Image: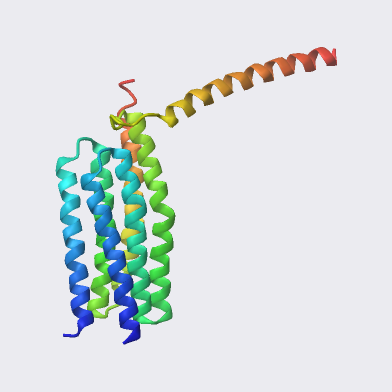
Amino acid sequence: MSWFYIVLLFALILLSFAGVLVFIRIILGPSLPDRVIAFDLIGTITIGMIALYSLITGVTSYLDAAIILSLILFLGAVAFAYYMRRSHKPKK
Amino acid sequence: MIIEIASATIIIIGVLFVLTSALGIVRLPDFYIRVSAITKAATLGVACIMVGVAIYFNEVDVALKAGAIFIFLLITSPIAAHIIGRAAYEDGVPLWKKTTFDEFRDYREGKLENEQNKSDRLGSDSKEEKSSES
C-alpha cells in the first residue's frame, strides 16, 4: 500500500462527501431546475470517481464508461429543459 | 516517483474544486448563482482529475480518452447550464431578493422594441422605394 494509493482513497472519500452534499440539495431543492442541476453535478462527480477508480485498479477501459456518461449527462440536461418548456406552455 | 507526485497534486486540486462546487450548490442562495457555481467549478475539477489520470498512465490512448472527456465536458457543460437557466427563467423561478437588476428582462423588452422599430423602418423604406420607383 503505497502513499499514492492512500492519496487516491482520500480523493475518493472527498468526492463521496461532495456527493452527499449535492444529495442534500436534491432533497431540499425548492424547484425542479434545482434538482436537475444537482443531478447534473452528481453525474459530473461520478465521472471523476470512475476516473479515480480506473487509476486505482489500473484498468483503463473504465474511461470509456466515463465518456458515455458525459454524453448522456448533456442529453439529460437538454431533455429536462425541453420538458420544462413544453409542460408549462398550455397554462399560458 | 515524480509522475506520481505530479498526478497526485493535480488530482487533489481537482477534487478540491469539485468539493467547492458541492459546497456552493448547498450554500448559495439562488438557482442562477448555483448554476454559476456548478458549471465552472465542477467542470474545472473534473478536467484537473482527467489531466492527472493522463499524466499517471503516460500512454497515448489513455491521454486521448481523457482529452475527449475533458473537451466534451468543457463544451457541453456551459450549453446545458444556459439551456436550463433560460428554461427556468421562463418557468418563473424567482431571483434572489437581494438581486438589484434583471438584465435578461431588459434585454427581452429592448429586443422587442428593436424589432418593432426595425419593422417600422423596413415598412417606411419599402414605401419610399415604391414611391421612388413610381
Q: Residue at x 33, y 71 (%)?
A: B10
Residue B26: x %, y % from top left: 21, 47
Whether residue A72 appears in this view of the structure is no
Rendering quarter of residue A20? bottom left
Rendering quarter of residue A89? top left
- Left or right: B28 as drawn, with respect to B44: left
Whether residue B71 appears in this view of the structure is yes
**Closest to the observer, B73 or B11:** B11
- Classify B39 as above or below B134: below
Q: Residue furthest bottom?
A: B1
Q: Residue at x 38, y 47 (%)?
A: B80
Residue B79: x %, y % from top left: 42, 47
Residue B86: x %, y % from top left: 39, 36
- Classify B83 as above or below B105: below
Q: Could you tell me which quadrant the C terminus of chain B lies in?
A: top right
Mark count: 0
How did the renderer colour the structure?
rainbow
Residue A45: x %, y % from top left: 25, 59
Q: Could you tell me which quadrant the N terminus of chain B lies in?
A: bottom left
Q: Residue at x 23, y 77 (%)?
A: A56
- Classify B18 as above or below B130: below
Q: Residue at x 31, y 37 (%)?
A: A83
